[in-house]
Image (cartoon, grey):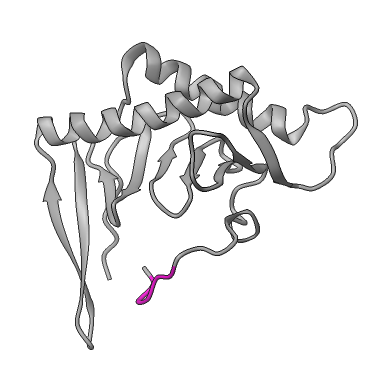
Amino acid sequence: MARNESDREDLLKEATGLVPRIELSTPAEAEPVLVGIRANGSLSVYFGADPMVQFDSRGLLRRACVDSFLYRTQGSTLARLERQRTPEETILRRHDLTDTERDELCSRLAGRLLALVAAMRAGTMTIRGQVPASETPGKPTVQEAVTARLGEIVDEIAARGIQLAPPIPTRRK
C-alpha cells in the first residue's frame, strides 16, 4: 500500500489493469465514471475518486472505497480499514462491520450501480473515452463488452443484493 495517496487525475489513463475500460458521464453523476474489466473477468467501477467498487470474476463484492475508507470482504461481512499515519509508518485500523452497517453500505453501493445501469439502458450516458482506443473487427466493441459485464453484475445485484466474495487473504511481511 502506498504511503501517500492522491486523487486520481486521469483514471482512464491510470487504470492500466482494466482492459477494456470506458469513462462515461451521466446526468445523475457529478464526476465521470470509469468502468473496467480485468483479464480474469473481474469488474471495477469508479464514481470519480470515491466511491469505488470491485467485484471478482463471479460478480461478488471484493472491495470498495467509500468516504475515504477501504472496505475488504471477510466472507460474511466487510472490514473497514482506516489508515493512520505517523512519520515512521502507516497503520491500518480494522473494524468488522455489523450486519446493519454492512447492509447499509451495500444498499448505498447497489443504489449507485442500479442508477448507473438504468442511465446506460435509457441511453442517457455519454462515453468520454475508452481503452483500447480502437476496435477489433468481428469482436464486440469496448463499450459493448464493458456495459454487458456491468449489466450482468447489476442484474444479479437487483435480483439478490450485493453478495460478498470469500475473504481476501491478509498479506504478511
Picture layout, residue 19 above or below residue 106: below
Q: Magenta includes 36?
A: no
Image: 47 above or below 13 = above
- Count how many numbered circles sit on residues in the image: 0
Which residue is most to the top? 159
* Residue lying farthest to the bottom in this orientation: 87
Q: Is residue 119 left or right of residue 64?
A: right
Q: Nearer the viewer, residue 167 or 43?
A: 43
Image coordinates of residue 133 in percent, x first then y, are: 80, 48
Look at the image and tell me in which quarter the C terminus lies: bottom left
Q: Residue at the far right: name it.
A: 137
Rendered view: 118 above or below 60: above
| Image position, residue 64 (x, y; %) | 35, 45
Dividing the picture into quadrants, the one containing residue 142 is top right
Residue at 19% across, 47% down: 79
**Is residue 76 visible from the viewing direction of this image?**
no
Q: Residue at x 9, y 36 (%)?
A: 98
Query: Is residue 75 rendered to the left or right of residue 43?
Result: left
Question: Which residue is more in the foreground, 72 or 21?
Answer: 21
Q: Residue at x 43, y 41 (%)?
A: 54
Q: Magenta region, mostly helix, strand or loop?
A: loop
Is residue 55 in sight in this rendering? yes
Image point 51% across, 37% down: which residue? 42
What percent of the width, then of the height, locates residue 47? 46, 45
Rendered view: 8 above or below 32: below
Magenta stretch in the rendered image: 2-6
- Residue 60: x and y in percent read 38, 30
Left/right of residue 96 with respect to residue 114 in the rendered view? left
Quadrant containing the N terminus is bottom left
